[in-house]
Image: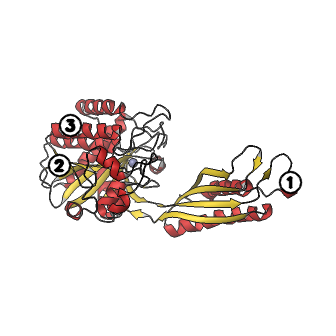
Amino acid sequence: MKYTPPPAAAGRFNTAWAELAALGRDGRRGGYSRHVFDDADMQMREWFSAQATRRGLDVELDRNGNLWAWWGTPGPGAVVTGSHFDSVPGGGAFDGPLGIVSSLLAIDEMRVRGIVPAKPVALVCFAEEEGGRFGLPCLGSRLMTGAAEAEHVRRLHDPDGVSFADAARRIGFDITHLGRDADRLANIGAFVELHVEQGRLLHAADPTAAIGVGSQIVAHGRWRITVTGEGNHAGTTKPDDRHDPMIPAAAAILAARRSLALHDGAVATIGRLQPIPGGTNVIASSVDAWMDVRHGGAAETAALVDEIVAAVREEAELEGCSVVVHRESLSDAVMFDATLTMDLALQLDAPVIPTGAGHDAGILAAHVPSTMLFVRNPTGISHAPGEHAETSDCLLGVDALADVLAELVR
Ligand SMILES: [Zn+2]
């Protein structure tokens, strides 16, 4: 891809990025903590509204707390782009905001090119994509599509015990009409979400490519493995008398890691262990290990989990422990719209790559033709302060998004 960004675009990008850089910094964890309806989220919403208004777009808050800006009159066949403002706790700067900043700059670019859309264009900022405050990822898009029940969401609580309903009330948001927004959904002709890549599959597909097009979100599930042994004294218990549940838990961690080498494209991670009682001089009586697994499809994912669990059971038997496995969630793979994806890939001459991360585009994909554009992430680090994309790549992203939108609005 040969492209020299116009200096004006680079200036606008740098200004927007500098304005957002100050909002929602997390002094303790590093990076950003921006959660739905908190101060940072409200400041970012204000920023977006001002940016959209300055561009002559009509800003609108939908019944589910998602913020929209319209170029043209809302109506059927709308071409929609956008992402989310919220972050994981201590997250990076790019996950979410890059898609929103790029959507504004893509409108500028289309106007520079003299494009007059034949269809309505909308920019959207979805609420609580990460589930960082109320624990439900893609909360705004799930509500809009009916994938989450309004009553269920109203009752969700944040870690401080504040309900979604109360959090909404505090910022003056009316939740009376929370829930499926069929008319809005019916008006969307296509949805394209631009996002920083959260890995390095783009590099693997083509080391020279700055932009990729999304093919699918792989299946994703969470399991809790509980190993029960016998609590005892760390200093006096002889080896033969030990029934230490941490040993099978360690086997789970190693089996999860080893499974990566055996299954191409699969990832299994144990990022959280909770031994009971959790004392340094105590052999634990039991331990919970939470495992996150992502693989091509739901069936393959479940089979991979079975393999890991078999390794845990083997070790548990040797140690005289028992194992109980509880599936907390399992979502099947989401395929993005094949025609839209191929059209974009051809138009941009960009590689097509899957992603192991969840996105609002994955929720919308069940209802409207949807796909994603990924901007190269040199280290692949995401959900951490080190997340990064080069400005020149971000500008290529804006240009690619403008190309794609210009084609879709014809
Ligand atoms: Zn995201």
Q: Amino acid at mark 1?
A: Pro
Query: Which residue is labeled 1 in the image?
Result: 239
Q: Residue at x 33, y 65 (%)?
A: 366
Q: Residue at x 24, y 55 (%)?
A: 63
Query: Which quadrant would residue 191 be assigned to in this image?
Result: bottom left
Residue 226 percent location from the top left of the image: 65, 60
Q: Amino acid at mark 3?
A: Ala
Q: Is residue 71 left or right of residue 158?
A: left
Query: Which quadrant of the figure contains the C terminus?
Result: bottom left
Query: Which residue is labeled 2 in the image?
Result: 70
Question: Badges 1 and 3: C-beta atoms under 8 Å apart?
Answer: no
Determine if residue 340 is in view: no
**SS for dot 3:** helix
Residue 184 percent location from the top left of the image: 21, 60
The answer to which of marks 3 and 2 sits earlier in the sequence is 3
Marks 3/2: CA distance? 13 Å
Residue 173 percent location from the top left of the image: 26, 48
Q: Is residue 250 left or right of residue 91?
A: right
Q: Amino acid at mark 2?
A: Trp
**SS for dot 2:** strand
Marks 1/2: CA distance? 69 Å
The answer to which of marks 1 and 3 sits earlier in the sequence is 3
